[in-house]
Image: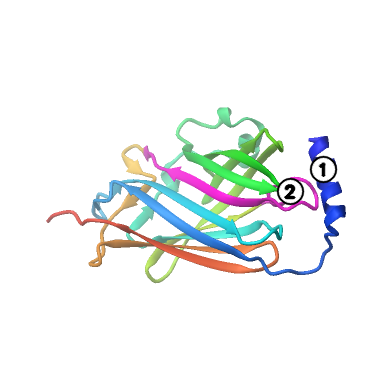
Amino acid sequence: MRKVALLATTTIAALGVTSTAWAVNADQSISVKLKPTKAGTKKKPANVKITVQTDTKPLDATPFATSLAVIHFDKNLVFNPKKFKTCSAQTIQADESTCPKGSKVGGGTSIGTAIGQTSHLKVTAFNGPKGKFMLHVTASTPLQIDGVIQATLKKDTGKFGYKLMVPIPDNLQQPVPGVFATLQQFITSTSGTSKGVPYIGLIGCPKSKKLNFKGDFTYSDGTKKSATTTVKCSAKKK
């Protein structure tokens, strides 16, 4: 860790990095997988597993981090976090294995880069208290990373029913002070049931036979980008 910090400091000095503003130049995308894609009903939602993948491709050498991601979910998807047990950020940070059984609702992977170094991170998802969705992000090399992203699930508008507000903590944006880490890829799958109630349920399929998803991203310099995608679906036969 000390060697990495020294390398980061040396690199910053060599590049003459200052606090002047820049505009992030990157391609941003989002993709979603849903299983199954056949809808249930409002009275009996189909239990689905949803996998959200975001990819950020820098187009130059300017260092930056993502400070906020907002993921919008089609209005035919419903969330039931109140029906599930919860685990706090403090418990997750201390020892996630002590979280209550049933509070873990998914996981995935992430890839981050900083000063030419690439980290492959593990992501574990937990249902948190008061509408929180916890993402425990860890890595051991080349940087030791251990942080909890406390996302918030909120009601959305228009063709979207819910949105997940995902603020990235400072220690993940800059694992070493002054060094931005770019999350080039973030994949999280979420699913589960509690007493027969799905964590995420599919209650219908629009006439277009496509479910809509969107991601809004804010970078460390204030630059904002958005990306959209759709997933094919089918309605339950009457």
Q: Look at 25% across and 62% down and name the residue there.
A: 209
Residue 55 picture location, percent across and down: 52, 54
Q: Nearer the viewer, residue 219 or 107?
A: 219
Q: Nearer the viewer, residue 79 or 236?
A: 236
Q: Nearer the viewer, residue 130 or 15?
A: 15
- Neighbor class of circle 2 (other Cα within 10 Å; few <14, some 14-19, many 20+) is some
Q: Residue furthest bottom?
A: 158
Q: Amino acid at mark 1?
A: Leu
> Per the image, is 175 magenta?
yes
Residue 81 picture location, percent across and down: 44, 47
Q: Quadrant of the C terminus?
A: bottom left
> Per the image, is 114 magenta?
no
Residue with the mark numbered 2 = 115
Residue 120 picture location, percent across and down: 60, 39
Q: Residue furthest left?
A: 238
Question: From the viewer's perspective, is 198 left or right of 149?
Answer: left
Residue with the mark numbered 1 = 7
Q: Secondary structure beneath disc 1?
A: helix
Boundaries of the magenta span? 169-193
Q: Amino acid at mark 2?
A: Ile
Question: From the viewer's perspective, is 154 left or right of 98?
Answer: left
